[in-house]
Image (spheres, rainbow, N blue to C red):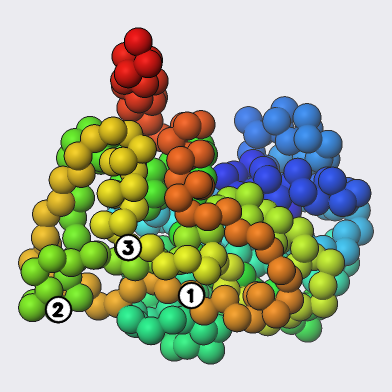
């Protein structure tokens, strides 16, 4: 597994270990102690940087969850994005081939689809919205070239969120609300003067991990959307965050209309597994309660206000 120490990787490891799976993680040296605590064997490798490919024992399944942490800083960190998401993936695929893997799960992104206001199916047109999406689309194509060696499952996650997450949509909204900073809402068209902003189908990280572990037990192949069933807008997320934090949300309308939403059609997923999705309102409250990037000060204010209210 690559990306085993990441936000989604750790709960996936926990679920697979609970199913009795033996896991070898290709990971940076600083992640080794944490992964060994979870019962993983660790082959130290910095994907996209180290050039040698570790020799591994035979494995039945490979899972690629790794991705560059610097995808937002374009163009300065574009070499890192391509190094991890493309070169690192290629190294991982070759390690998997040499280990006799029979099946591989590649985690892509829902952002590979062309912008659309309609629910996105696995056969919807794909395009490249930005460098990150382009690198993930390249990753899909590279992975598919290995189908002669093992079966390939491409998972396209949509807005995975939960406690401890950094630098993603939900924690960024939480941080802006907690600092009383305005949330930018892109209208659907120029006549939309009170927009809801981008609409998404978020999936709690524990749900995503349970679904992944369940899919390992199925014979699924091909492309699969990984998303929840609830549709929530940026405005709705910010208003619920403000309610939980006890603050008034601030919004500003962006002059540039958005070109689409990020709504998944999860029909194929629901035909394979029957997950119990954490309701978004509940998941957001848990994220605030247990912490997110930049959330410590907001949590302190929240606890203080509740104590004052109880006195």
Circle 2 is placed at which residue position? 189
Q: Is residue 234 above or below residue 127?
A: above
Q: Residues within 10 Å of mark 1 (few under 14, many from 20)?
A: many
Toward which corner of the image does residue 87 lie, by quadrant? bottom right
Picture coordinates of residue 197, whole percent (x, y) = 24, 65
Left or right? Give the position of 151 relative to 223: right
Of pointers 2 and 1, the one earlier in the residue sequence: 2
- Element under label 2? loop
Left or right? Give the position of 307 relative to 110: left
Picture coordinates of residue 140, whole percent (x, y) = 57, 75
Q: Which mark is residue 233?
A: 3
Q: Who's the residue at 58% across and 68% down the image?
A: 226
Circle 1 is placed at which residue position? 264
Q: Quadrant of the C terminus?
A: top left
Rounded to the nearest angstrom, the CA distance separating label 2 from label 1 is 21 Å
Rounded to the nearest angstrom, the CA distance separating label 2 from label 3 is 15 Å
Of pointers 3 and 1, the one earlier in the residue sequence: 3
């Amino acid at each position: 597994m690559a990306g085993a120490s990441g936000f989604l990787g750790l709960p996936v490891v926990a679920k697979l270990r609970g199913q009795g799976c033996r896991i070898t993680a290709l990971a940076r040296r600083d992640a080794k102690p944490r992964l060994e605590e979870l019962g993983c064997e660790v082959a130290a490798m910095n994907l996209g940087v180290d050039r040698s490919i570790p020799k591994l024992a035979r494995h039945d399944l490979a899972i690629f969850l790794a991705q560059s942490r610097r995808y937002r800083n374009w163009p300065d960190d574009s070499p890192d994005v391509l190094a991890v998401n493309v070169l690192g993936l290629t190294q991982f695929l070759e390690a998997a081939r040499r280990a006799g893997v029979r099946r591989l799960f590649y985690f892509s992104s829902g952002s590979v689809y062309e912008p659309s206001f309609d629910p996105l199916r696995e056969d919807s047109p794909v395009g490249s919205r930005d460098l990150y999406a382009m690198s993930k689309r390249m990753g899909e194509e590279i992975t598919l070239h290995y189908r002669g060696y093992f079966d390939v499952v491409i998972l396209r996650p949509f807005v995975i969120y939960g406690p401890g997450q950094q630098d993603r949509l939900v924690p960024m909204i939480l941080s802006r609300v907690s600092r009383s900073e305005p949330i930018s809402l892109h209208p659907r068209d120029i006549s939309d003067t009170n927009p809801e902003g981008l609409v998404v189908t978020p999936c709690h990280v524990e749900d995503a991990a349970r679904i992944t572990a369940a899919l390992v037990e199925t014979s699924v192949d091909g492309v699969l959307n990984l998303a929840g069933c609830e549709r929530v807008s940026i405005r709705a997320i910010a208003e619920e965050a403000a309610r939980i934090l006890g603050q008034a949300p601030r919004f500003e309308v962006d002059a540039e209309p958005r070109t689409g939403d990020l709504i998944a059609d999860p029909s194929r997923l629901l035909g394979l597994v029957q997950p119990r999705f954490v309701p978004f309102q509940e998941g957001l409250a848990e994220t605030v309660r247990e912490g997110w990037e930049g959330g410590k000060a907001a949590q302190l204010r929240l606890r203080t206000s509740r104590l004052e209210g109880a006195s």
